[in-house]
């Protein structure tokens, strides 16, 4: 049973969003209607992107649907993989409830096995945005469990080995208070986190946190002012030792649906600079978001509702 709606977020989670975004039950798509009427600003726009060192142009080949996880009519979102790309975790909606699911495969060229819900991570509440550490032993996600449903916060769970169950999830409390924290992404050092939050206004924007070592608490959240636009910015994925960031944003035009953007920085301690560039070869007139990238940035999974149902796509460069 779905719990009583006590916050506008649940109207967003349940809303049937049609028109420019297609017709789909898409988590948080309705929140895109809360954008300000100001023109896009910040680091938005259509300019060039930062560098990936000597890795060549940041252009992907044609995307294709990731097959075999659940049925073609199931709502699939938020993909995240282990670094060897043999395990995938993702969100799937069943009877209006979002839970965390998992699938495995024998090799990177083998098909994915039929997915199953991860009981240690899922709950009677809404559980969203799974994100694995690069070693596959820590997973972050957002949930409204154990609190007033007006609050979505970040949670973390750990396992001792890849073949072991996940431990009890723990709420991340050191980031400070917010009505909505989602979609954490942690770099390969496990010292830098980027996530989406509504802590500064009614729009989702990107925030960062750091810590001294992987066992320490995360420090207070700070806005990524050089990246955020006047409109919605969300779903970050950091890679390339924390030097590159792909995220979803609506910055290109008023009423524009979410697209994927890339921005870079020269080193992990520097701010992201320049103008975030759209991944035009992956974007469409539908909704795109939830990116995951391999550490070398050559393999991307993302979500699009271009066929009317949120599906997981992948592309390579």
Image (spheres, rainbow, N blue to C red):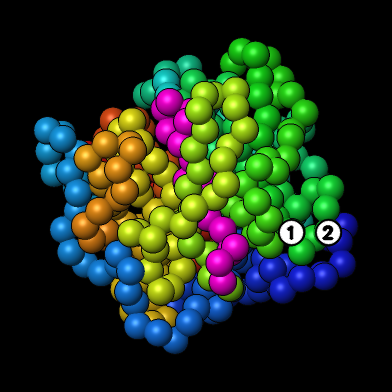
Quadrant position of the N terminus in the picture: bottom right
Is residue 117 positioned above or below 145 on the image? above
Q: Depth check: 140 or 292 in front?
A: 140
Direction bottom: furthest residue: 37
Could you say which quadrant of the image residue 120 lies in?
Answer: top right
Instruction: Please indicate, yes or no, whether residue 82 appears anywhere in the rendered image.
Output: no
258 vs 181, left or right, is left
Which class describes the residues within 10 Å of circle 2: few (<14), some (14-19), or many (20+)?
Answer: few
Is residue 293 positioned above or below 257 on the image? above
Task: Give the residue number, with chain letter if any, for mark 2.
Answer: 148
What's drawn in magenta, residue-wise? 184-201
Task: Give the residue number, with chain letter if any, for mark 1.
Answer: 151
Q: Position of residue 158 (x, y in %)?
A: 66, 24
Q: Position of residue 96 (x, y in %)?
A: 74, 59
Give the secondary structure at mark 1.
loop
C-alpha distance separating marks 1 and 2: 6 Å
Is 104 part of what is drawn in magenta?
A: no
Instruction: Please indicate, yes or no, whether residue 234 appears anywhere in the rendered image.
Output: yes
Question: Which residue occupies 21% across, 57% down?
Answer: 274
Question: Which residue occupies 62% across, 54% down?
Answer: 181
Could you say which quadrant of the image residue 66 lies in?
Answer: top left
Which class describes the residues within 10 Å of circle 1: few (<14), some (14-19), or many (20+)?
Answer: some
Give the secondary structure at mark 2.
loop
């Amino acid at each position: 049973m779905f719990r009583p709606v006590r916050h506008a977020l649940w109207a967003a989670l349940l809303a049937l969003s049609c028109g420019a975004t297609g017709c789909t039950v898409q988590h948080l798509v309705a929140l895109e209607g809360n954008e300000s009427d100001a023109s896009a600003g910040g680091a938005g726009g259509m300019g060039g992107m930062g560098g990936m060192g000597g890795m060549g142009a940041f252009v992907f080949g044609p995307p294709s649907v990731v097959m075999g996880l659940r049925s073609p009519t199931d709502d699939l979102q938020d993909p995240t993989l282990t670094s060897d790309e043999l395990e995938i975790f993702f969100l799937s909606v069943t009877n209006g409830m979002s839970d965390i699911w998992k699938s495995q495969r024998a090799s990177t060229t083998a098909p994915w096995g039929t997915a199953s819900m991860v009981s240690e991570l899922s709950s009677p509440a809404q559980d969203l945005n799974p994100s694995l550490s690069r070693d596959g032993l820590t997973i972050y996600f957002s949930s409204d469990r154990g609190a007033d449903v007006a609050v979505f916060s970040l949670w973390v769970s750990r396992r001792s080995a890849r073949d072991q169950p996940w431990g009890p999830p723990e709420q991340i409390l050191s980031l400070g208070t917010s009505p909505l924290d989602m979609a954490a992404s942690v770099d390969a050092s496990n010292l830098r986190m980027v996530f989406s939050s509504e802590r500064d206004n009614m729009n989702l924007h990107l925030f960062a946190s750091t810590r001294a070592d992987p066992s320490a608490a995360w420090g207070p959240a700070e806005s990524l002012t050089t990246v955020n636009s006047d409109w919605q910015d969300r779903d970050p994925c950091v890679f390339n030792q924390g030097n590159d960031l792909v995220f979803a944003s609506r910055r290109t035009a008023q009423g524009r649906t979410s697209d994927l953007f890339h921005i870079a920085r020269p080193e992990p301690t520097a701010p992201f600079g320049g103008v975030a560039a759209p991944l035009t070869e992956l974007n469409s007139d539908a909704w795109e978001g939830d990116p995951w990238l391999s550490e070398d940035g050559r393999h991307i999974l993302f979500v699009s509702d271009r066929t009317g149902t949120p599906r997981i796509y992948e592309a390579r460069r």
